[in-house]
């Protein structure tokens, strides 16, 4: 049975144990679809990652969250300002891969209430073949982009 969006909550990344984040981001199933994941995650990498994501919150008033399902950590994701666009990223633990649609629906509901966001972009690596969820949401292809030397397919969703 699908998870209800009210089972999903967002917290700040500093609230999550570094060991949990190291374990999550060290799983080889995660690296499969993250071409920018080219280093080993350890406590120092987590500290740098969390500091970078918290800097987005200070700069833009919005950023990435720790994502919880029924209070349990299942991944991280959220909005990050890329130029004039708000990009949405989502990195779930393998056990939570099926929760993506419920999490994205909750994030879209959030975006609809934020007057700064008129549309959301999504960047997906070419390794991601199943795009049905984005299509069902109404996201449309917006070309390809290179980001830090890696190629991504870009999609756009008007909120």
Image: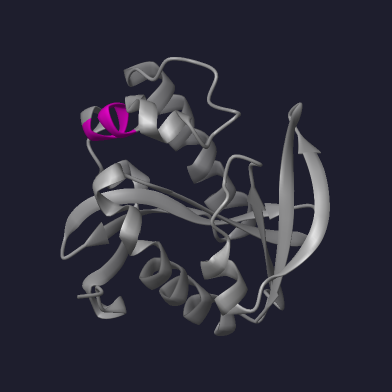
Query: What residue is drawn where x is 45% and y is 76%?
Result: 105
The residue segment tinted magenta is 20-24
Residue 63's spot in the image, x, y percent?
53, 55
Q: Quadrant of residue 62?
A: bottom right
Estimate the x, y position of residue 100 in percent, counting from the top left.
40, 62
Q: Is residue 21 located in the magenta-colored stretch of the structure?
A: yes
In percent of width and height, residue 116 lies at 68, 75
Which of the pair 78/74 is nearer the observer?
Answer: 74
Lateral position of residue 54 relative to residue 71, left or right: right
Tell me: residue 61, above or below residue 28: below
At x 57%, y 83%, the residue is 112
Is residue 24 something one can see in this rendering? yes
Res 84 seen here? no
How many numbered discs, if any?
0
Left or right of 40, for residue 38: right
Left or right: residue 102 compared with residue 123: left
Q: Residue 8: say if magenta.
A: no
Q: How is the image coloured?
A: one colour
Q: Residue furthest front?
A: 129
Pick the front one: 41 or 97: 97
Snapshot quadrant of residue 157: bottom right
Could you tell me residue 93's position as x and y percent?
A: 31, 44
Depicted 32 relative to depicted 100: above or below: above
Residue 25 vertical position relative to residue 118 in the rendered view, above or below: above
By secondary structure, the bulk of the magenta-drawn segment is best described as helix
Between 152 and 79, the residue placed more toward the observer is 152
Q: Residue at x 58, y 48 (%)?
A: 56
Residue occupying image coordinates x 76% and y 26%: 149
Quick one: quadrant of the N terminus?
bottom left
Closer to the camera, 11 or 154? Answer: 154
Q: Quadrant of the C terminus?
A: bottom right
């Amino acid at each position: 049975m699908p998870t209800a969006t009210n089972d999903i909550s967002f917290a700040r990344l500093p609230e999550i144990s570094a060991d949990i984040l190291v374990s999550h981001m060290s799983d080889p199933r995660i690296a499969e679809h993250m071409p920018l994941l080219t280093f080993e995650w350890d406590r120092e990498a987590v500290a740098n990652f969390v500091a970078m994501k918290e800097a987005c919150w200070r700069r833009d008033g919005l950023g990435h969250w720790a994502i919880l399902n029924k209070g349990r950590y299942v991944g991280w994701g959220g909005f990050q300002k890329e130029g004039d666009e708000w990009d949405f990223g989502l990195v779930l633990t393998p056990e939570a891969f099926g929760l993506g649609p419920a999490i994205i629906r909750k994030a879209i509901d959030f975006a609809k209430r934020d007057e700064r966001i008129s549309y959301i972009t999504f960047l997906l690596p070419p390794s991601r073949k199943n795009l049905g969820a984005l299509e069902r949401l109404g996201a449309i292809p917006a070309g390809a982009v290179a980001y830090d030397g890696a190629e991504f397919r870009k999609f756009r969703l008007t909120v």
